[in-house]
Amino acid sequence: MALSPDRLDRFARHIVLPEVGGVGQVALAEAHVVLIGCGGIGSPALQYLAAAGVGRLTLIDDDVVDLSNLQRQTVFAEADLGRPKAQAAADWVARFDAALECKAVVGRITADNAAELLAGADLVLDGCDNFATRLAVSDACVRLGIPLTSAAVGRFQGQVANFAGHLEGQSCYRCFVGDAFDAEDCDTCAADGVLGALVGMMGAFAAMQAIRVILAGKTELGDPQWGRLHLFEGLVPSLRTMKIAKDPDCRGCSGEA
Ligand SMILES: [Zn+2]
């Protein structure tokens, strides 16, 4: 793929970075990212992935835009209230950059339909709000050999990690959280609250980590940092990183799934 003169202009600030460059920009343009959840994490992640020129986006969300979402879900406006989030978010992408291919899937991803919905993705970015979906998505990514950028928030804390449980010796999201949450559908935001700006940081952080995966093996920024969980504490701002070890008994990535 060759970038047209207007695309070279549009992405000039990326291309001038030696760690991205023209090679990286082409890799972004050729990438297909599936976003799970167009909410607080998905909105800014989507905005920065689209702004970065990720050529194909699939947006999966079964929810509709509610007034209480506007405190943090930055792609939506009052005119979107009551509309399916995936469709409203896809409309935002179409307005933002007509050159990007964007598909909205209004529905919930589950263990039963994950293979079909994720097929052909280069990366899945999961910013959904419940463990059952996160685990189903993680298991599907391992089975399909797709890298996963996982992001989650609660109150003043956020976490972001890249997983590649399909690769030898690399952990998956299930190695991190275990099996206890499969049946649990806990949207803790509603009960516990969450600071909008913190969600925005984690969504943008997830987009950055996703870009590392897309550039892996192509440019210097392409270090996916598999299995490294970055934990951000927002009350007294601090970031720490921990390595998620592969669980030899994990039913997601150790051959028994
Ligand atoms: Zn695992």
Image (cartoon, rainbow, N blue to C red):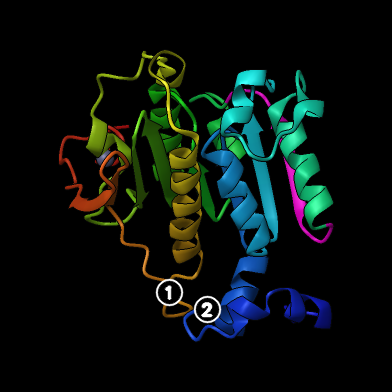
Amino acid under disc 1: Leu
Circles 1 and 2 in contact, beta carbons < 8 Å: yes
Is the residue marked by circle 1 packed among few (<14), some (14-19), or many (20+) residues within 10 Å? many
Read off the residue under disc 1.
221
| Residue beneath the point at 39% across and 36% down | 152
- Asked if the beta carbon under badge 2 is closer than 8 A to the nearest atom of ligand 1, the reply is no
Residue under the point 44% across and 18% down: 187
Coordinates of residue 237 in the picture (x, y in percent): 29, 48
Considering the numbered disc 1 on the image, is that residue within a helix, a strand or a loop? loop
Res 120 visible: no
| Residue 44 in the image: above or below residue 186 | below
| Region rendered in magenta | 98-108
| Image-quadrant location for residue 233 | top left
**Whole-percent x and y of residue 103?**
75, 42
Q: Which residue is drawn at 63% across and 64% down?
A: 52
**Residue sitting nearer the eye, 165 or 216:** 216
Instruction: Quickly name the residue at label 2.
Output: 20
Magenta span includes 165: no
Q: Position of residue 161 (x, y in %)?
A: 34, 49
- Could you say whether the residue bearing mark 2 is in a helix, strand or loop? loop
Residue 97: assigned label: none
Amino acid marked by disc 2:
Val
**Which residue is at 74% across, 74% downward?**
10
Question: Picture quarter containing residue 6?
Answer: bottom right
